[in-house]
Amino acid sequence: MNLSDYWKQFERTGSINDYLNYACASEEWQAQEKEESESLDESGNCTGNGLVSHACWRLR
């Protein structure tokens, strides 16, 4: 499931458990994004520690 699936499930049920599933998935996603962004050097090139995407989602 992706984040929007977890959120849609919560919207349908209103269950605290479904909200907590969304919150946990969101934290995991944010940690993964941080890890991937740290693998890039200042010029946007790969440092060899992770994947490089052609799309940059960082705010400037």
Image (spheres, rainbow, N blue to C red):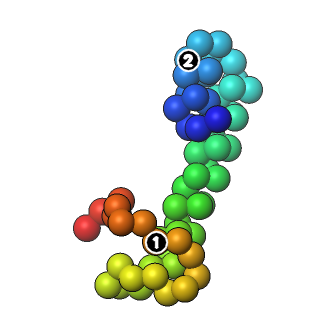
Question: In the rendering, which numbered label is found on residue 52?
Answer: 1
Q: Is residue 37 above or below residue 18?
A: below
Question: In the rendering, which numbered label is found on residue 41?
Answer: none
Residue drawn at (67%, 44%) of the image: 24
- Label 2's element? helix
Residue 25 coordinates in the image, percent (x, y): 64, 43
Q: Residues within 10 Å of mark 1 (few under 14, many from 20)?
A: some
Q: Is residue 7 above or below residue 34?
A: above
Q: Amino acid at mark 1?
A: Val
Residue drawn at (35%, 84%) of the image: 42
Residue drawn at (55%, 85%) of the image: 48
Which-is-in-front pick, marks 2 and 1? 1
Residue 8 coordinates in the image, percent (x, y): 55, 22
Front residue of this view, candidates 5 and 16: 5
Residue 49 occupies quadrant: bottom right
On the image, numbered disc 2 is attached to which residue?
A: 11
Q: Amino acid at mark 2?
A: Glu
Front residue of this view, candidates 48 and 16: 48
The quadrant in which the C terminus is found is bottom left
Residue 41 coordinates in the image, percent (x, y): 41, 85
